[in-house]
Image (spheres, grey):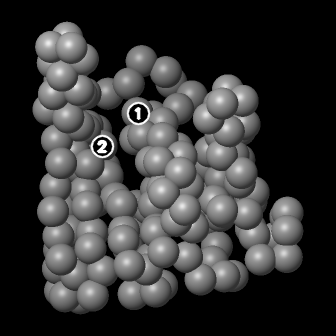
């Protein structure tokens, strides 16, 4: 079964156009791309897919992530594909920005999901967590605030 990692966000972002977990999803897509992993970012709707696509275009040249919306780009897709529809090609990593568990979740080795700070989105995340567990996935969580503080402390120690 797949490994499912939930990132827990305890604070709401300051950018109204892009929730913090969307920004983190894009950063994780860049990370997995650098690890030569093909990524599928699954969004709630077409508008969210366009938002993620646009944000990835804003990465600077040194950290550019080849990506496209499903159906665009090369025949077998770029390393990172974005869609509100099911993927057309096999991928190793699923980054789920949808509020429900994707029907195609069993097709991925690694699944990244998020627990946003907003209460209703937290409730939805708990339901996804439970659904993944019932399907037999291996689950883990990571507190985003703790991760960023550890990174800051490590940087300060150097």
Q: Where is residue 107 in the image (x, y as percent from the top left)?
A: 46, 86
Does dot 2 land on a helix, a strand or a loop?
loop
Q: Position of residue 119 (x, y in %)?
A: 23, 42
Viewed as shown, does residue 64 lie left or right of 144? right
Q: How far apart are marks 1 and 2 (CA)?
A: 8 Å
Does dot 1 land on a helix, a strand or a loop?
helix
Residue shown at 46% from the left, 68% from the top: 94
Q: Does residue 98 appear anywhere in the picture?
A: no
Q: Where is residue 130 in the image (x, y as percent from the top left)?
A: 17, 74
Q: Which of 132 and 119 is in front in this view?
A: 132
Viewed as shown, does residue 74 lie left or right of 80? right
Q: Quadrant of residue 36?
A: bottom right
Q: Nearer the viewer, residue 77 or 61?
A: 61
Quarter of the image with the C terminus in it: top left
Residue shown at 38% from the left, 24% from the top: 13
Q: In this view, does 154 lie above or below 56?
A: above
Residue shown at 26% from the left, 49% from the top: 7
Quarter of the image with the N terminus in it: bottom left
Q: Does residue 155 appear anywhere in the picture?
A: yes
Q: Which of 29 and 85 is in front in this view?
A: 29
Q: Which mark is residue 116?
A: 2
- Number of labelled discs? 2
Q: Identify the mark nearer the N-term, 1 or 2.
A: 1
Classed neighbour count for the residue bearing mark 1: other residues with Cα under 10 Å, few (<14), some (14–19), many (≥20): some
Check whether the beta carbons of the residues at disc 1 and disc 2 lie within 8 A of each other: yes
Please name the residue that numbered disc 1 is placed on.
20
Viewed as shown, does residue 7 lie left or right of 64? left
């Amino acid at each position: 079964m797949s490994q499912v990692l939930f990132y827990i966000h305890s604070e709401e972002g300051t950018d109204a156009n892009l929730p913090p977990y969307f920004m983190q999803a894009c950063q994780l897509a860049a990370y997995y791309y650098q690890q030569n992993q093909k990524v599928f970012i699954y969004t709630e709707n077409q508008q969210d897919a366009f938002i993620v696509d646009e944000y990835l275009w804003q990465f600077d040249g040194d950290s550019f992530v080849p990506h496209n919306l499903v159906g665009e780009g090369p025949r077998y897709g770029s390393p990172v594909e974005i869609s509100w529809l099911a993927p057309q090609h096999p991928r190793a990593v699923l980054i789920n920005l949808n509020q429900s568990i994707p029907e195609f979740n069993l097709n991925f080795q690694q699944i990244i999901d998020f627990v946003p700070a907003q209460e209703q989105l937290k409730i939805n995340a708990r339901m996804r967590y439970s659904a993944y567990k019932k399907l037999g996935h291996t689950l883990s969580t990571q507190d985003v605030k703790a991760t960023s503080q550890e990174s800051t402390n490590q940087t300060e120690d150097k």
